[in-house]
Amino acid sequence: MGDNFTVNMDEFLPLRDVVFNTLRRAILTGELKPGERLMEIHLANRLGVSRTPIREAIRKLELEGLVTMIPRRGAEVAQITEKSLQDVLEVRRALDALCVELACDRITFEEKEALKKACDEFEAATRTGDVTTIAGADVALHDIIVQATGNQRLIQLINNLSEQMYRYRFEYIKDEKGHDNLVNEHRMIYESIQQGDKKKAAEAAKLHIDNQEKSIIRQIRLEREQQLKKKDKRQ
Amino acid sequence: MGDNFTVNMDEFLPLRDVVFNTLRRAILTGELKPGERLMEIHLANRLGVSRTPIREAIRKLELEGLVTMIPRRGAEVAQITEKSLQDVLEVRRALDALCVELACDRITFEEKEALKKACDEFEAATRTGDVTTIAGADVALHDIIVQATGNQRLIQLINNLSEQMYRYRFEYIKDEKGHDNLVNEHRMIYESIQQGDKKKAAEAAKLHIDNQEKSIIRQIRLEREQQLKKKDKRQ
DNA sequence: TAATTGCATTTTGTATACAAAAGATTGTAC
DNA sequence: GTACAATCTTTTGTATACAAAATGCAATTA
């Protein structure tokens, strides 16, 4: 079992929020695996708190779609199926397009500058080859665009949807051959926003998602095949 | 204070879900007003349960955006501002467009029939003049389209967003002059889906939202003016 | 040997208890 | 009458207790 996640007592938050963040993190990084049961006493002991904050955290994870409740049996980490991921991506495609369109209208001069810088930094990051650095630069870039929309609800939704794909982030970033494409796609998006060309921006954003989709779906199929092989061996 | 909401003990659900549904309903119907505090013991006594299920229900309402948490002060019903509503509508516009586009591709023959019937029934409902009947027919019609997308995530998101505007549903339905427009907009959407014309469908869906937006925003401004007048009088 | 029943254990669902923080109230001094 | 301080109340945050359901296992029976 993936061990040693602990509560971060530094933060001055209600325990339920600390637990919520901790569990979410554990699920997104794959430390808690799909299908794994979340048992309250167990988690409570492990995190050194009582069951109450654990339960409240689980209620929030439930609504976020990261855990599934089974009546009288408790929570387990939600399974990701290819279908559910395609559903998420289908929505993200539309919302990302909306994002860049809104950004075309509302982005400030400072944000444009920041976006340009983020593009350069992303390119630099790809040259380091370090996956974490690249992922960080990618998040930073997208964050600027999302924030530029000024639409709080949209920001919240996109963040939540991104979360669902978090486990696969690294996979499509690992693929070195794709780096030039990613850099180009980012540049394309930046330029369209710079020019205020909504149509072009939306197309670029959709293309960007489509490419990620291909890469992620490929990854999922690969994983599933490997799991099947393992099963075969056991039999 | 808006009185007598009680838990519905018929349903066989964990108390937290019963409480969740009860409170949500109360908020959406306006029985619990924006800014009103949700005090745990008070609610617990009123609903005849202990604080635990109340707290868990509040955690879910929090993530749904229906209540706001103030640290060490508890929950209160989220305030709806014009900005927050515009944010919601901006997102809905994109997602409704996505909905009808997907419906164009995926709707089954039976669903097409049902949609046609729903259009007719909506028209019939407008002629009764009964607001509840009209609202019901409207929901039924939109439900068919949303379900036809087959995208669970999208269905969930649209339902949640609709929720945020629930309090204003009646207002734009009350406006009798708009009924013919609504009927026509529905027919337009139906026909585009029938023909599988995504572009036309998306345009129709967006127009539909735009008109609702106008009507809702007008309503909000009216409400705010009335509140200001009341305040003036008191001073 | 297979199936089933009964018991023990685990785990959730709910209620309650207690501590600490925030808020209201009262009283006193100026 | 106002300002400030002390105290009392309310309310949240957290922990724990208890009941009921589900699960697993062993023993018994066909």
Image (cartoon, coloured by chain):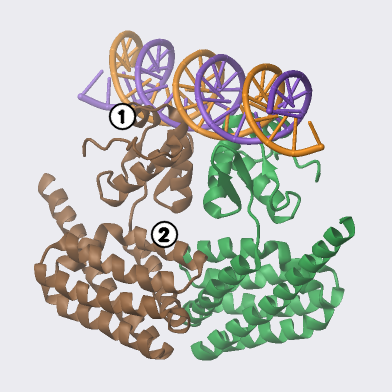
Chain colours: A green, B brown, C orange, D purple
Provide the chain ID for the residue under circle 1: B
Left or right? Give the position of A70 relative to B57.
right
Residue C17: percent from left, percent from top:
50, 13
Q: Answer whether residue B169 is visible to the viewer in this image.
A: yes
Label 2 sits on residue: B160
Identity of the residue drawn at 40% across and 31% down: B40
Which secondary structure, mark 2? helix
Quarter location, residue C25: top left
- Give me the C-alpha separation between circle 1 and circle 2: 27 Å
Quarter location, residue B135: bottom left
Foreground of the two, A75 or A215: A75
Q: Mark 1 and 2 residues: CB-CB less than 8 Å, in contact?
A: no
Identity of the residue drawn at 64% across and 88% down: A188
- Residue type at the position of mark 1: Arg
Residue A101: percent from left, percent from top:
49, 81
The disc at residue B46 is 1
The N terminus of chain B, quarter of image: top left
Foreground of the two, A233 or A14: A233
Which secondary structure, mark 1? helix
Q: Answer whether residue A136 is visible to the viewer in this image.
A: no
Residue A105: percent from left, percent from top:
46, 81
In the image, residue A216 above or below residue B58: below
- Residue type at the position of mark 2: Asn
